[in-house]
Amino acid sequence: MERIALVSDIHGNIPALEAVLLDIKQRGIEKIYCLGDLVGKGPHPEKSIDIIRDTCDIVVQGNWDDFLPNETNNTYIQWYQHRLSSEQLSYIKSLPFSYDFMMSGRKIRLFHASSTSVHHRVYPWDSLDKRKEMFTNTEKTGGLNGRKPDVVCYGDIHYAFIHHIQEKVLINVGSVGNPLDMTQASYVILEGDNGSDVVSSFAIQLVRVPYDIELAIRQAREEGMPELEPYIDELRTATYRGLKK
Ligand SMILES: [Mn+2]
């Protein structure tokens, strides 16, 4: 049996990331995969990239990782761009779309948001058809042929859940740095026979980790981050700013 920790949506929140990495370490888990959105929203994208590159065996691309390196006149986006080296910008731009592996006879697929795009959002309350599309093979996931995944793990919505859908399992790992379902950092542990084609027992854990939210807010304030108040409100209340408009 082996355990793999899945983290996602760090968004430059270092106190949250450090709390999650400590929790993973204290459980004796050595393998960590990241589902994207290292940057954006929080004040320290440059540290987030360095730490994730250092600790994660696999990293797939998030929507922020995709669009942040693009040229823009938007001063809010530019604030984050200016904190990254050109090498870091090309690193996030070149991250892979998805990653497949076998565990306990299940084909497990990781991507950020959906099987078609890092910018296509799927919520747990979306239609069954839309959620079933998460298990299709697409050009983005490496081509239409081959075995479809039995388990899909994704991030993007900052809202952790596990759905069993007709022999398949859809898992959202939640967000480390900007959780919008409760005010604690989120990650997932998968446990089983890593790399095995043989069906055997398989476990999924949703883990919530309290972290120093006020420290994260102080860091954002010290850096003079733009759109500070909506960010503070999201960290303290776990309510998405888009829903308050
Ligand atoms: Mn995100």
Image: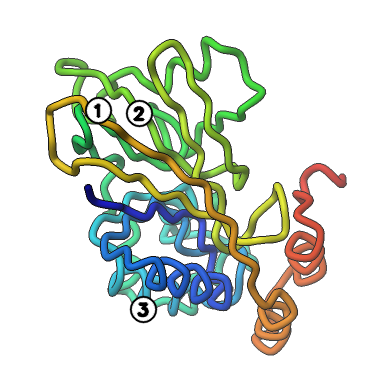
| Quarter of image, res 218 | bottom right
Residue position marked by numbered label 3 in the rendering: 85
Looking at marks 2 and 3 on the same chain, the residue that comes earlier in the sequence is marked by 3
Q: Please, is residue 198 above or below residue 99 in the view?
A: above
Q: How is the image coloured?
A: rainbow
Q: Which mark is residue 182?
A: none
Q: The C terminus is located in which quarter?
A: top right
Element at badge 2? strand
Kindly give the residue lying farthest to the bottom in the view shown.
Answer: 222
Q: Write the residue at 72% across / 59% down.
A: 183
From the top left corner, tell me how far across and down residue 179 is, in percent.
65, 55
Q: Amino acid at mark 1?
A: Arg
Q: Please, is residue 132 above or below residue 171 in the view?
A: above
Left or right of 235 on screen, residue 74? left
Q: Which mark is residue 151?
A: 2
Residue position marked by numbered label 1 in the rendering: 106
Left or right of 45 on screen, residue 231? right
Q: Amino acid at mark 3?
A: Ser
Element at badge 3? loop
Q: Nearer the viewer, residue 101 or 60?
A: 101
Q: Kindly indicate whether the residue at mark 1 contacts the one at mark 2 (C-beta within 8 angstroms).
A: yes
- Could you tell me how far apart the alpha carbons at marks 3 and 1 are, in whole angstroms? 39 Å
Q: Please, is residue 187 above or below residue 243 in the view?
A: below
- Asked if the residue at label 3 sits under 8 Å from ligand 1, the reply is no
Q: Nearer the viewer, residue 129 or 184?
A: 184
